Image (tube, rainbow, N blue to C red):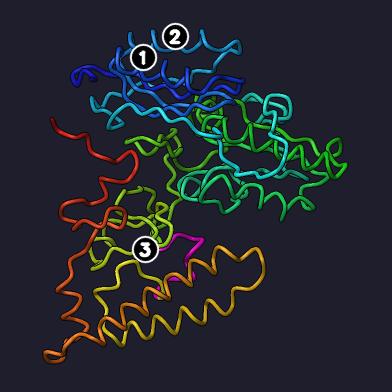
Amino acid sequence: MLDSDAETVVVLFYCYQDSCAASLAAEQRLLGAELGLCGRVLVAAEGINGTVQGDAAAIAVYEAAVQKSFSSQIDWKRSIDKSNTALFPDFVVKEVNELVGFGLQGSEPLDVVAESGTRLSPQEFHSLLENPDELRLIDVRNTFEYDVGHFDGAIDPGMTHTAQWPRFVKNNIQDLKGRTVMLYCTGGIRCEKASAFLRRRLKEDGAEVSTPVYQLEGGIHRYLEAFPDGGRFRGANFVFDKRAQMRSGDGTVIGRCSECLGPWDAHHGGRVCTVCRALVLVCDDCDASSEHGEYWCPEHSNLRGSYFHFLDRFSEKELQAQAQSLQLLLDKEVGTHRKNRRNTLRKKLLQVQDRLEHLQLEPKHGETTAEDAEVSVPRRCRACEKPYCQCPGVCWGFWKEIAQE
């Protein structure tokens, strides 16, 4: 366990190198237990990726032990945390198929080290940004990360998970051909694999030579170390631990509340998309005035007012309106690339219809107004469905509370 009275070190790291995932996972679990660490580590046949917290001495031992398993030099991105709190509820090691999941089926696995784009130091990356002509600067993180901070002029692919990157490349490769492409992410692991995938597709189209692909070495983390004032990065750098974000000296707030559109860039585990559970920016005032706490991310913003997770607070009339709206939306979703969206809408429409049938079979005991129905059903956590007073989002990801023994 962490010493709550001492400042701790947080390390962000990854390494692409052929590995035995099972033995690597066992080694990681042993190190975590022996050194009293907390954090999240992914291991796969293609390498390792993690964010780990511990006291300075424990982290030094951990780094040395992990490095022994890899011939490639690992770039340890360190930061000091003075909050005296564990940024993760525990130390979890997961064996996965891919460190960055693209969900590729039936294709030759990427050789990330051999196929990835040219690495640029923060200074080199910054210099190229000075000449934006014929440049395509792409943020390969999730939209909720982009929303709170990104480089000037960066393209948001609109992703809620990395498996959507191949789709973005397919839809935009003609625009990218013949231009200089620059990719970036938090610490480098996602843009390295994303660049490898893009370069393979360019090679297949005979455009690899005419389309140079670069990646920011060390990601936003290293860039902000090199440019403490923020340089050309605006806003906050989202991180996947209880800090939620790290800031430069710039201090600009570029995020906007999804409800009132006022300046806001603080995520909260209880404010997620009611459809996909991705984080959504909602300010404290709007959340306090919300009776239901159901929100919609940019990808599902067109479902606002039509798609709700909790249906038991609605009257028959309201449910009938929802069913009609969902059917109209479903009828508009055509094409093979809209299959997942159709399935989502179809499933919710069936749930609404089942709820309507249930209400119609219930014995009537006087007329219940919509207002009465809403008052009788308390707000619940979208992730775990417990009453919000019991779980105000503390079950979501790194906000999960540490179990008390």
State how far apart marks 1 and 3 are (Cα): 40 Å
| Amino acid found under the numbered disc labelled 2 | Ala
Where residue 37 sits, quadrant-wise, is top left
**Disc marking residue 311:** none
- Which residue, given by chain and number where applicable, does mark 3 sit on? 295
Dot 3: within a 10 Å radius of its alpha carbon, few (fewer than 14), some, or many (20 or more) residues?
Answer: many
Residue 92 placement (x, y as % from top left): 36, 29
Dot 1: within a 10 Å radius of its alpha carbon, few (fewer than 14), some, or many (20 or more) residues?
Answer: some
Position above or below: 167 against 218: below
**Disc marking residue 65:** 2
- Which residue, given by chain and number where applicable, does mark 1 sit on? 31
Quadrant (top left, top right, bottom left, bottom right) of the N terminus: top left
Between marks 2 and 3 in the image, the one whose residue lies nearer the viewer? 2
Q: Is 304 a magenta residue?
A: yes
Secondary structure under tag 3 reads loop
In magenta, the rendered stretch is 296-305
Residue at the image point whose x is 80% and y is 42% from the top = 202
Q: Say whether residue 86 is left or right of residue 306.
A: left
Q: Earlier in the sequence, mark 2 or mark 3?
A: 2
